[in-house]
Amino acid sequence: MRLTCRSCGATGSAEAVFGDVDAAAALQLAGELDPVIAKAVWHYLALHRLGTRALSWPRTEKLLREMLDLTRQPTIRRRHRDWTMTPAMWREGMEQMQAQRDKLVLPLKGHGYLLEIVADLADKTESSAEKGREQGIRSQARSTADAAPLAASVADPALVDLHGERAARQRLRMPPMTDAEEADWLAKRRNRS
């Protein structure tokens, strides 16, 4: 039986592949990959080969070992700080590199570009989470502050409208109004009445 690797282009009989010590070591390492990133790693490895030449089994084993070491760490150190990593970030980073294959200088010599991509992904994830936390804090502060004047708002229709505007913005996932915007909004609403 003849086997061909779709990623690296290596071909050989099953007996030769499984009988080769380096091939067996590489395949054993491949079995240790997180299932979330396994397929992406094979495509990523193809970026390390020259043209139509196949990666040697020792080089494949070395790259797989490096990828296992990188992806098993909960954080990476990049740009003078630690970034929390997930398998999904690694997969997305490798997929982005594969999509940019025509723009890359191949064969890749190391993992530096991948580390930059996943650090960017981690940065975006942290930024998004921080924005969500800040909105939650603002929302909670406003709902607490709004509870007392709610009874008084019955006498002031502009305040009732303001509560409706806040709720609509929250439902539509729009940014909340600043205090100055709310004051201006209330003034305009009261002048119309």
Image (cartoon, rainbow, N blue to C red):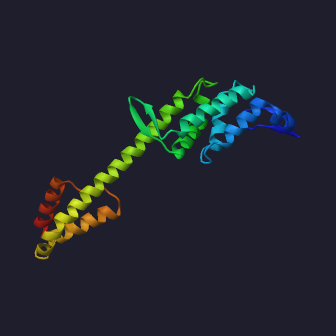
Q: Farthest right residue? A: 1
Q: Is 72 above or below relative to 56?
A: below
Q: Position of residue 167 (x, y in %)?
A: 28, 66
- Where residue 148 sits, quadrant-wise, is bottom left
Q: Is residue 176 at least partly visible in the picture?
A: no
Tell which of 106 and 3 is nearer to you.
Answer: 3
State the residue at coordinates (71%, 26%). Answer: 58
Q: Is residue 107 left or right of residue 55?
A: left
State the residue at coordinates (75%, 25%). Answer: 53
Q: Is residue 75 left or right of residue 174?
A: right
Q: Is 87 above or below relative to 176?
A: above
Q: Position of residue 46 (x, y in %)?
A: 67, 32
Q: Could you tell me which quadrant the N terminus lies in?
A: top right
Count of numbered badges drawn on the protein? 0
State the residue at coordinates (54%, 43%). Answer: 92
Q: Is residue 144 at least partly visible in the picture?
A: yes
